Amino acid sequence: MNGPGKTRRRPWLVATLVLGLVIAAASLAMLAISRTWAVQGESVTVALTAAPPGAAYSGAPVDYARLEARIALLMQQPEMVGLAVGTIENGRVRFTKGYGETRANSGDRVTPDTVFRWASLSKSVASAVVVGLAQDGKLSLAAPLSRFGTSLTLPGGATARVSVADLLSHRLGLPRNAWDDRLEAGEAPQLLRAGLASVPLSCPPATCYSYQNIAYDTASEIVEHVSGTAYANVARDRLFVPLGMTSATIGRTGLEASPSWARPHRGGRREVVVGEPYYRVPAAGGVNSSIRDLLRWMDAQMGDRPDVVSPTELAIMHVARVPTPPHGRRGAMDRALQHASYGLGWRTYDYAGHQLVGHRGSVDGYGALILFDPALRSGIVMLWNSNHSRAASLQLEFFDQLYGLPATDWLALPVPPPVIAAAGPGPVTVGTATAGRTAR
């Protein structure tokens, strides 16, 4: 019936619908900027940097002939023995190749399947396991460490006041690398953790960043406490197997059982025995794999394997939680990576107006790095078997090309960068991997 009352209500109905659409549009606009995640008691605002579905890729073509020329110069340095490099652009593997030897003067070549140590890149695996268990309701990231019956003690009973998230972001208040020297001397990590209550704090717990290895490995005890399973097995079953990381293992035995594995070298090309100490803190430094599998790990961290590591878990891990003030001598690369912060097992940086996520590692004659741009789903991974730190600077030469920036000699090698015509954007084949293949 079309009475007067009905006629008067229609404008209000239209206005209500329009207002609802405006509010919805505003909400979506805000969603593109940030989102607040309730992390089981810890409110964290996360910038959503990932490109929306169907968004145009804005990365510049990477000239792999030029990158290979730079790597060739790097490998001429007397400190370099073996190296493996991989890249992903826009979610696709573009480059996978090995260089040099698995052991000096052996003639055994490094391939994309040669296994190296990850060193501190292992911390990202521990974070993913713990955050995944938290999302499954097995634990709370806001829970105090005292709840899990671990061997860790802190001054003043601080284990009752610092959380799992504090542990994974190095906010325990301990001096930097507390008692690493004693771990390297052969002392048991559980006994060292039990004695940390006697170490003077460098700041009030949960208030500042101070990098740890022995204390960080408390994460492995937490995982075993809530799962009833060995840490290495949990990491294997939750991450390595579903991601297809067939070469990935935790521990020295896994490294040395690999068909091709890189021996460690120090002081140039002097081979040394594989060190055991940091394998005894597996959450801090226990992972091994080939460069192929490190690419698979980076692929998952850029959101391409939500079946294994969900978008929520990535946001929780990658958000910057605490600034990381510099210590010691800083090179040009460290100065260029600005606003350095730490999340849960990951470092974050600003570089040339872009947000990057990554980590570096160095242990007992090995080096490792991973650095990626989540918005462009592009990044680089490297593994090498010497203590030559200059190799890490290659990562910025990759990103300078990706961002279309002028060439900078980040490696600072004796020979200047070669002038090579830029390659086109089409796929290329390098090493033993075909460009365009996914990282899975």
Image (cartoon, rainbow, N blue to C red):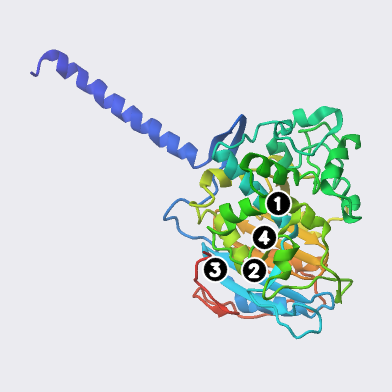
Compared to 313, does 388 lie above or below? Answer: below
Q: In what element is the residue under mark 2?
A: helix
Classify residue 59 as left or right of residue 150: left
Q: Residue at x 59, y 42 (%)?
A: 133
Q: Closer to the N terminus: mark 4 or mark 1?
A: 1
* C-alpha span from label 3 to label 4: 14 Å
Q: Residue furthest bottom?
A: 107
Vertical placement of 33 versus 296: above or below?
A: above
Q: Nearer the viewer, residue 62 or 77?
A: 77
> Residue 354, percent across and down?
62, 53
Q: Amino acid at mark 2?
A: Ile
The structure residue drawn at horizontal position 52% and vertical position 47%, both measured from the top left corner, is 310
Q: Is residue 386 left or right of residue 379?
A: right
Question: Disc 3 to disc 1, how far (Cα)?
Answer: 24 Å
Q: Is residue 334 visible?
A: yes
Q: Which mark is residue 93?
A: 3
Tell me the residue that label 4 is attached to: 370
Gap in Å between the C-alphas at discs 1 and 2? 17 Å
Q: Which residue is mark 2?
A: 291
Q: Is residue 108 above or below residue 275?
A: below
* Sequence order check, earlier mark of 2 and 4: 2
Label located before the other in sequence (3 or 2): 3
Q: Is residue 80 above or below residue 310?
A: below
Q: Choose mark 2 or mark 4, whichever is in front.
A: 2
Disc 2 from disc 4: Cα separation: 10 Å
- Of pointers 3 and 4, the one earlier in the residue sequence: 3
Query: Badge 4 local density, few (<14 within 10 Å), some, or many (20+)?
Result: many
- Residue 289 picture location, percent across and down: 66, 65
Q: CA distance from mark 3 to mark 2?
A: 12 Å
Mark 3, secondary structure of its residue: strand
